[in-house]
Image (tube, grey):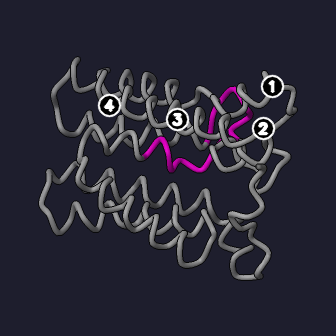
Amino acid sequence: MRLVLVVIIAYLIGSIPFGYLIVRATGGGDVRETGSGGTGATNVSRRAGKAAGIITLILDAAKGALAVIIVRSMWNADWLIAVAAVAVIAGHIFPIWLRFRGGKGVATGAGVYLALAPMAVLVAGLVFVAMVWWRKIVSLGSLAAAVTIPVYIYFVPHSTPLLVAAVADAWFIVYAHRGNIARVWNGTEPRISDLKK
């Protein structure tokens, strides 16, 4: 019963589509009609400007942290916290309110691991910055950062449930970026210069 409750709580928190709501509120229509088709900060920036993108980034990260903090405060059990870490990202990527078509999970994942393994996020953030500086493509930086977190957690030992969650979350994020990966391969993925000023 606790497991089901954890999945429901974390999934519903993750499902809150902040980027979609912010763009709608600014009169920008459906953010999923832009760029990669997601509801995350990069697409929001393209549709409604950098300020809106930053707000989306903060709120998406906050819901990731909130989900695991709530579960940890209710049941301080590693496996339940790990389930929450996966469910909140799944909720962001597959939100019930938007017919299971949401964001890519990167900011929400950052919030999750800021609460659970902050040094992993710091290292992943450095990898993100280096990749974006090198290739000028946000999605490549996001993918590199997502993969870095489970690698860090593996080499700097944490609990087994957290490692399993990190691997699952990285897989979700890579899967959510499958369209970006195809566009990078084809040379059609938008670069930083394409963001709305």
Residue beneath label 3, please?
60
Q: Residue at x 52, y 56 (%)?
A: 173
Left or right: residue 184 versus residue 110 is right
Q: Which residues are magenta?
A: 94-109
Residue beneath label 2, please?
48
Name which quarter of the figure residue 48 lies in.
top right
Which amino acid, mark 1? Thr
C-alpha span from label 2 to label 3 = 16 Å
Q: Residue furthest front?
A: 197
Which amino acid, mark 2? Ala
Residue beneath label 4, please?
68
First reached walking from the N terminus: tag 3 or tag 4: 3
Pointers 2 and 4 in contact (C-beta within 8 Å): no
- Quarter that holds the N terminus: top left
Which amino acid, mark 4? Val
C-alpha span from label 2 to label 4 = 30 Å
Q: Does 108 lie within the magenta span?
A: yes
Residue beneath label 1, please?
26
